[in-house]
Image: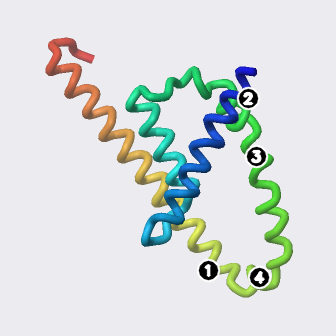
Amino acid sequence: MKIIKQVGIIFFVCWISQILETALPFDFPASVIGMLLLLALLFSGALKVDHIREKSDFLLANMAFFFIPAGVSIINYLDVLKSCALQLAVICLVSTVITFAATAYGMKATLYLIRKKGRRKGGER
């Protein structure tokens, strides 16, 4: 019964995000709206992590299965991909480097702020 309740909560948030997507005057993915809604509910305390822990752990553990249909459908467009393979390779390489750099600088800034906060409280880290 606990799993059904957790699935119901997640489906309810997804349903509300679908409604909000149609109500917005601009394009915005319902999945992103759903994630933001879930985050807002968790931060506000209206929803506790324990209310969705088991189902979210299951979804995270099986995430690879959700990408299989998208990966298989790429086969239908191999001719299109072959015509722009060099551009795709450059885009993948550049975006990977940018992602690594953004992550590194983000972590550096986070560690700096943690150390700064620790020094203000009087404890040296």
Q: CA distance from mark 4 to mark 1?
A: 10 Å
Q: Which residue is mark 3?
A: 64
Q: How many marks?
A: 4
Tell which circle, 3 or 4, labels the residue nearer the N-terminal end.
3
Q: Is residue 8 above or below residue 115?
A: below
Question: At label 1, which amino acid type do we have?
Answer: Gln
Question: At label 4, which amino acid type do we have?
Answer: Lys
Q: Which residue is mark 4?
A: 82
Quick check: 121 left or right of 24? left
Element on which disc 1 rests: helix
Element on which disc 2 rests: helix
Which dot, 3 or 4, sits closer to the camera?
3
Viewer-proximal residue, 102 or 43?
43
Q: Which residue is mark 2?
A: 4
Q: Which residue is mark 1?
A: 87
Question: At label 3, which amino acid type do we have?
Answer: Ala
Question: At label 2, which amino acid type do we have?
Answer: Ile
The quadrant of the picture occupied by the C terminus is top left
Which dot, 4 or 2, sits closer to the camera?
2
Tell which circle, 2 or 3, labels the residue nearer the N-terminal end.
2
